[in-house]
Image (cartoon, coloured by chain):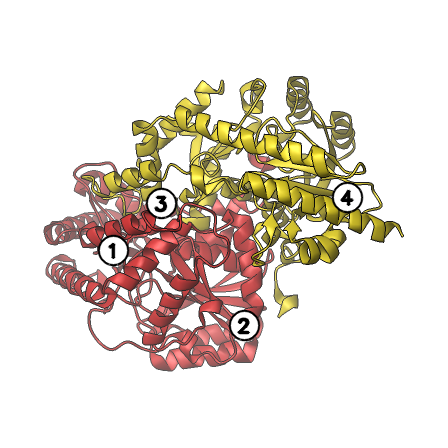
Chain colours: A red, B yellow
Amino acid sequence: MEEEFASRVSLTSKSGLNAIYPSRDPEMISFTGGFPDANLFPTQELGNSFQNVIGGAQTPFQYQIGQESEPLREQISKLLAADGTQVSPSKIMVTQGAQQGLDLVAKLLINKGDGLVVEGPTYIGALAAFDAYEPTYYTVEMEEDGMNLADLKKILIQQQVKLIYTIPDFQNPTGTVMSLAKRKQLIELANRYNVLIIEDAPYRWLRYEGKSLPTLKSLDTQDRVIQLGSFSKILAPALRLGWLTAGKGLFERLQELKGGSDLETSSLMIQTVNYYLTHYDLDAHLNQLQKSYQVKRNAMMTAMENYLPDFAHYTRPQGGFFTWLTVPKDLDLEKIQNSQLKPNFHVMMIPSTNLFPDKKHCNGARISFSNVTLSQIDSGIQRLANGLSSGYQKQSV
Amino acid sequence: MEEEFASRVSLTSKSGLNAIYPSRDPEMISFTGGFPDANLFPTQELGNSFQNVIGGAQTPFQYQIGQESEPLREQISKLLAADGTQVSPSKIMVTQGAQQGLDLVAKLLINKGDGLVVEGPTYIGALAAFDAYEPTYYTVEMEEDGMNLADLKKILIQQQVKLIYTIPDFQNPTGTVMSLAKRKQLIELANRYNVLIIEDAPYRWLRYEGKSLPTLKSLDTQDRVIQLGSFSKILAPALRLGWLTAGKGLFERLQELKGGSDLETSSLMIQTVNYYLTHYDLDAHLNQLQKSYQVKRNAMMTAMENYLPDFAHYTRPQGGFFTWLTVPKDLDLEKIQNSQLKPNFHVMMIPSTNLFPDKKHCNGARISFSNVTLSQIDSGIQRLANGLSSGYQKQSV
């Protein structure tokens, strides 16, 4: 059968997306998934919201007849405005998590072979979404203050690029933040070379220190930025609710594609999240998340400082869920993970291999601190340190 | 911007999918959407199911860690077995409504230009899903007992076809059922010409008279049938839960594509529907649905017999939500609807134009009886009859 699949499948079947799911080894300490801490879900409030919406005068169980998402889109518009980004509710589309936004935007824009710039490393799920449209990838190296814009400029000069994909805040997987100077330059480059930008911002509200920088969308004067957001990390993933903002010309076409993909997002989920935002204090909830995740981030930094061998380097994220580990170039962390870390040390992370379109960068790994306990962080990083040293010796022999 | 979209958008932007959504004219009687009757939703039982799942020991708000859907897949497997179709839970995938199944299967199989057979007329949302993958459509005429298989055979002999899309039970939009003889022949043809089949079966459980026929999937011995099902019509659309069954070779690839499209379906929805199926009597609920929709179907048939002019013909569906209206070939029902029915008679249906890939068949229309009251059926069909006669005179002058 294999030969009868569409050509796109030759890419999508190698995405490695399932690496984000946990192992079944009961001893395993897993730093893989970008899962929020389930203890922080506002379960009571969401439960009440469901109950009230289900018991309300208008059934939330029917297909949408057109306007059900308007109150939620207004709430999202207010959230964005409070964050300095002005977007009319009519230019906000509710999606099946931000993941669906990635799929729809690529579906809208990418013909086979079209140029698409991604950060290297980047979000594994974005590559899984984009792969299905068979772009020509151009990868721009990540630096401490966001992507290398000199590299980007070279690509834009030399290649036909349609779309740039970036996560400016607490990038997945490196945890870095794009500087204000780079944000402004990126918008200028997009304007000059007539390129669209996806600004993926699921972690933006999870900042644990320092000051928030303006979104790319707020710096955009030519409707070039499609911003994606999500309730998965700030409320709960199983709501499967995200949003995208796009200019008018794109918006209508994206809605048509959404219809073909899944008809619509659940009216029940839409009304429930709107109920939550109307009746409860999201800011207070965010505050609590920030405090809790900050403690975990700090514990992770302490453990890494205490235990990791000298040849290992890591980022110090100001927010989000991830730190990024790098080891010398001749080490292959996927091999070390499979031969040492998982079987012998019962610890795992996401090696960099699948986080680059060319799958040729093997000396990095994403380490998530969001869904592990403080003691798991401590013992897991000890195990990692031991496993790395052991793998280092073996590969260096 | 228009010229910068991917080429697939030139098709998807003309799907006409939004025609299924109701009008804002308060006097309108709409026979358009395939909406279930909201009065028949098991609201109390679903509400209890949500409450129990949310209040349970394990949070349903997290991402899935891999096995959450297993109990539901087992329930679906049992449902299918009771219907004569044996499918292992491991070959059932939970989807975002059956609509996502259509998108994923086309995404898996269709390269630009690949041959795809559809029934003419067919489900508008299927065309919207398929359009995004730019197939070459071959349309097989619908007869009273399902698609014209002599036509299909000619196409299979002359053209390269990869996939056949059919709705054997209470077809959308014609309401017809494929005969057992044709089901068997269709499977034989697929085997002989090495083609896959999508069997879309959202209405299968809504039979109001006569005996159920075996599913295509149950007649399939070569894993050629991908069956799609949905809880939208039998429980509630806003659950956004459907399923697909596929052979092992396809299954894994479809799961990868699902990951790229939306990561996963909501664990909360999956657990809630599983709770409902475990704790409540779906058969009793289906029985109630069948009785209520049968009354509506009967009212629709009576009204059509009483009021429609002689030049109008219609099908007598044994189940599902739709009857199919046809008028003489020189009449264009989309034009009559826009010039007469909607503005002057405040009644609407789905004209056939967008239900054929070539958009050249204009003398048919889908009329839905599921989400209108008995009195709306009576007065709506009176209005339709008057409007058609008026349009007939104008177009015949």
Residue picked out by circle 1: A367
x and y, in percent, of residue A316 in the image = 22, 67
Label placed on residue B266:
3
Query: Label 2 is found on which chain of the structure?
Result: A
Determine the CA span between mark 1 and mark 4.
61 Å
Chain-order first, disc 4 or disc 3: 3
Q: Specify which label sits upstream in the sequence, 1 or 2.
A: 2
**Rendered residue at 14%/51% (across/down):** A373
The reply to whether residue A33 is in sight is: no
At label 3, the amino acid type is: Ser
**Amino acid type, residue under disc 2 in the picture:** Val
- Identify which residue, A116 or A110, lies in the foreground: A110
Badge 4 marks a residue whose secondary structure is: loop
Q: What is the x, y in percent for residue B178?
A: 65, 25
Q: Mark 4 points at which residue?
A: B363
The numbered dot on residue A134 is none
What kind of element bears circle 1?
strand
Dot 1 amino acid type: Ile
